[in-house]
């Protein structure tokens, strides 16, 4: 998975803090993070003309093409942590047990807590 950003290093820094993943590659316009188990990573590509998607999108708005779902143990704590790292809570929240967040480059991502 690759997320575009005018500031790929800043976006990679955000997700590294948020997820606690390590860098596997670190180039000026391409950074890859990998989870502790060495599974599928997340890359960030420099795109100087990046236009953030709109959530939720209306006709003519740039639409998200993908989003990340992050499973968390405590939804309220995870939202607070994400905000401390630079995310914002999206104005539109379609589900009670999920929080749509917006990363610093404007990409929506979801925090969700499984039912106990």
Image (cartoon, rainbow, N blue to C red):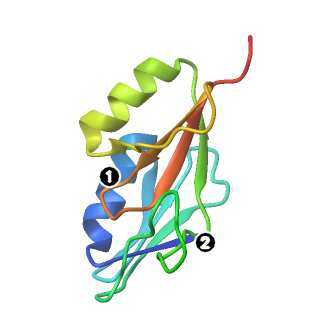
x and y, in percent, of residue 77 in the image: 41, 20
The answer to whether 54 is drawn above or below residue 60 in the figure is: above
Q: Earlier in the sequence, mark 2 or mark 1?
A: 1
SS category of the residue bearing label 1 = helix
Viewer-closest of 37 and 41:
41
The answer to whether 56 is drawn above or below residue 37 in the figure is: below
**Could you tell me which residue is drawn at 55 percent across and 75 percent down?**
59
Q: Quadrant of the N terminus?
A: bottom right
x and y, in percent, of residue 86 in the image: 26, 45
SS category of the residue bearing label 2 = loop
Disc 2 target residue: 65
Q: Do tag 2 and tag 1 residues touch (Cβ < 8 Å)? A: no
Q: Residue furthest top?
A: 116
**Could you tell me which residue is drawn at 48 percent across and 77 percent down?**
62
Q: Is residue 77 visible?
A: yes
Q: Is 3 situated left or right of 102 in this image?
A: right
The answer to whether 85 is drawn above or below residue 49 in the figure is: above
Checking the image for residue 14, the label placed there is 1
Q: Is 2 situated left or right of 7 in this image?
A: right
């Amino acid at each position: 998975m690759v997320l575009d950003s005018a500031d790929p290093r800043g976006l990679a820094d955000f997700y590294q803090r948020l997820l606690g993943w390590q860098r596997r590659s670190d180039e000026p316009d391409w950074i890859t993070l990998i989870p502790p188990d060495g599974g599928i990573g997340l890359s960030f590509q420099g795109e100087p003309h990046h236009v953030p998607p709109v959530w939720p999108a209306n006709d003519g708005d740039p639409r998200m093409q993908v989003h990340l779902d992050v499973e968390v143990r405590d939804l309220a704590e995870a939202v607070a942590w994400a905000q401390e790292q630079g995310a914002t809570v999206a104005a539109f929240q379609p589900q009670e047990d999920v929080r749509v967040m917006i990363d610093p480059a404007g990409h929506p991502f979801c925090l969700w807590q499984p039912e106990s």
